[in-house]
Amino acid sequence: MTAEKGPSTGDATLRRRINPWEFEVFFDPRELRKETCLLYEVKWGASHKSWRSSGQNTTKHAEVNFIEKFTSERNLCPSVSCSITWFMSWSPCWECCKAIGEFLTHHPNVTLIIYVARLFQHMDPCNRQGLRDLVVTCGVTIQIMSVPEYDYCWRNFVNYPPGEEAHWPRYPPLWMQLYALELHCIILNLPPCLKISRRYRHQQTLFSLHLKNCHYQVIPPHILLATGLIPPSVTP
């Protein structure tokens, strides 16, 4: 693969890559689209080879589609470790969190890492509890996508044009930092601090922070400061 030629025509993943416009639309943290796009990478045992593909919502959520397809097509040998990484445009809802937990319970040799561009209905207590259960009970790693993840996805999951290897879409880092702040609140079982709304007439996504004493006391100071909205003198 070279920057001059784009993805090699001999690349086995080429037919499974998504279009650049799809990546830009689905993974823009400012866009509150209803659909979910899931990019996934699977590794077996000590092998350095990865299986990469993508999925979206159908009549079922993308996460459930993956689990059903994966378990029906793969023979999960308990003695062979399996590492799965998801890059998702939305975090799982509580029902999908439950399905993921059941999948991992039945297949203890599987580890799962989830990177998300946005938090799905993060004010909903059920969704918050579902994500918390995945992290605390099931041992799933959940993180907000940042610059390295966007770069990685562009290079490995997108059929980018020739010469555009490093030209993945640059989104405002503040959005990633705000979602990361709210994800900390979810995992630490704190009240929501991030409110997001969409002004459709003006095509604007608006956010506001509502921090309480418990947020300042529990959330690591560097997470608060990364938003750029919290003066250093405010943190304890």
Image (cartoon, rainbow, N blue to C red):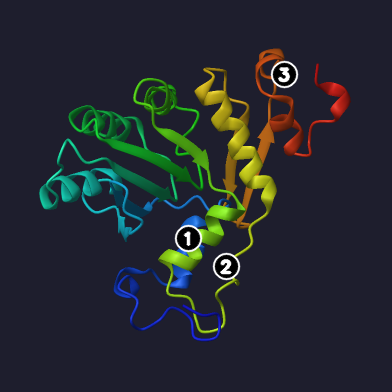
Question: Which amino acid is tagged 2?
Answer: Trp
Q: Position of residue 105 (x, y in %)?
A: 22, 27
What is the residue that sits farthest to the front in this orientation?
46
Question: Which amino acid is tagged 3?
Answer: Tyr
Question: Which amino acid is tagged 1?
Answer: Cys
Q: Which mark is residue 216?
A: 3
Instruction: Name the residue tied to disc 1.
Output: 153
Image quadrant of residue 120? top left
Q: Position of residue 46 (x, y in %)?
A: 32, 48
Instruction: Name the residue tied to disc 2.
Output: 168
Look at the image and tell me whether residue 28 can be seen: no
SS at badge 3: helix
Answer left or right for 51 relative to 18. Answer: left
CB of mark 1 within 8 Å of CB of mark 3? no
Answer left or right for 205 relative to 230. Answer: left
Q: Give the residue at x 15% y 43%.
A: 76
Q: CA distance from mark 1 to mark 3?
A: 33 Å
Asked if 203 appears above or below 224 in the picture, the reply is below
Query: How many C-alpha atoms fall within 10 Å of the one at disc 3: few (<14), some, or many (≥20)?
Result: some
Q: Position of residue 51 (x, y in %)?
A: 30, 59
Q: Give the residue at x 33% y 44%.
A: 83
Answer left or right for 228 relative to 159. Answer: right
Closer to the camera in the image, 176 or 206: 176
Q: Give the residue at x 22% y 29%.
A: 102
CB of mark 2 within 8 Å of CB of mark 3? no
SS at badge 2: loop
Going from N to C along the chain, the mark reached first, 2 or 3, is 2
Asked if 77 appears above or below 186 in the picture, the reply is below
